[in-house]
Amino acid sequence: MRTAVCLYASDTLSIASSFGNSLRVRKINSRRDRRSRAMTLTVGKAVASSSAASWTPAVIIAGCALLFTVATFWWLNVRRGRIKSFEPHSFAAYIGPEKVRIRLPLVFHNTGAVPIVIQNLRLRFVGEPSTRPLPWVATRSHIKPESDDGHAFPAVFSVAGRTADQTFQEFGAPSLGFILGARDYPVALEAKLGHKRDWRTVLRFTWHAGRIVHPGNFITYENTPDGLSEDERKDVQVGLEFAQMGAGQTGSGSAKLPTVNELESGN
């Protein structure tokens, strides 16, 4: 009996000892695993930090190069600019009781890369808000009114990207809607563009109407300050008023100056 009890106690101590050893082994292995994971994380962070530090400049340079390429392509091939024009240094005019014609040498410059379509033009007197703008009535080949000045009816045209086109446009109506005087008028050239709904002002300039010394004849004048004396300005004013009332001048000297009806009948 004693022998059996001793054997049982020995087996129990052996099992307890084995269980304790197993727990110690598990704790040791757990510690080793934690240390291994900690070392792995530390090495991973170090590698990632080193990789980020070495690749960041390259990524920045590549990104900047890509942005520059896209921006350059857009600027050279896709960017839509605007239409600009410039103050004319001359004009041709006829001021009559039933017809008004103003011809201007105009340059249209497209500042962008893609073409811009000009659908319509008109001339508006800024200081005369109650009047209607003068519509576009013709395109000519040169500024001097002649029977062979290449009359063409208004038609839609385009201005290629980064180019400038010279044209000679004529505006007219049965009347201006006001009595033209021998003074300077602020004028706006407006255009109806293909990609816009509303009229756009492409040019503002001063029209020197005091230069029109023969309003009843369709001839060319300089669009510069007239420098007229007070008496000369009064004479021009009287001539303009008479012309708009049907008693205009027909020119002076031996050479007969052309009228707008003669020029248009020749077309």
Image: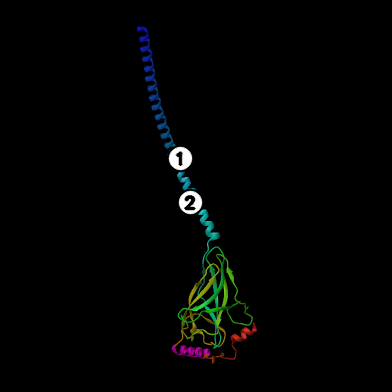
At x 49%, y 83%, the residue is 209
Q: Which mark is residue 39?
A: none
Label 2, secondary structure: give it. helix
At x 59%, y 85%, the residue is 260
Image: 40 above or below 257: above
How would you classify the magenta stretch by its main secondary structure? helix
Left/right placement of residue 33 relative to residue 164 reads left
- Percent x, y for residue 54? 45, 41
Is residue 175 found inside the magenta-colored segment of the image? Answer: no
* Quadrant of the image containing the C terminus: bottom right
Using the rendered view, name the quadrant where residue 10 is placed: top left
Label 1, on which residue? 51
Left/right placement of residue 154 relative to residue 211 reads right
User: Can the viewer see residue 78?
Assistant: yes
Compare marks 1 and 2 and give the one earlier in the sequence: 1
Could you say which is closer to the camera, residue 242 or residue 45? 45
- Percent x, y for residue 61? 48, 48
Label 2, on which residue? 64
- Percent x, y for residue 169? 57, 77
Over which residues does the magenta segment extend? 230-244
**Amino acid found under the numbered disc labelled 1:** Ser
Label 1 CA crowd tier, 10 Å (few <14, some 14–19, many 20+): few
Label 2 CA crowd tier, 10 Å (few <14, some 14–19, many 20+): few
Could you say which is closer to the camera, residue 41 or residue 185? 41
* Quadrant of the image containing the N terminus: top left
- Percent x, y for residue 69? 52, 54
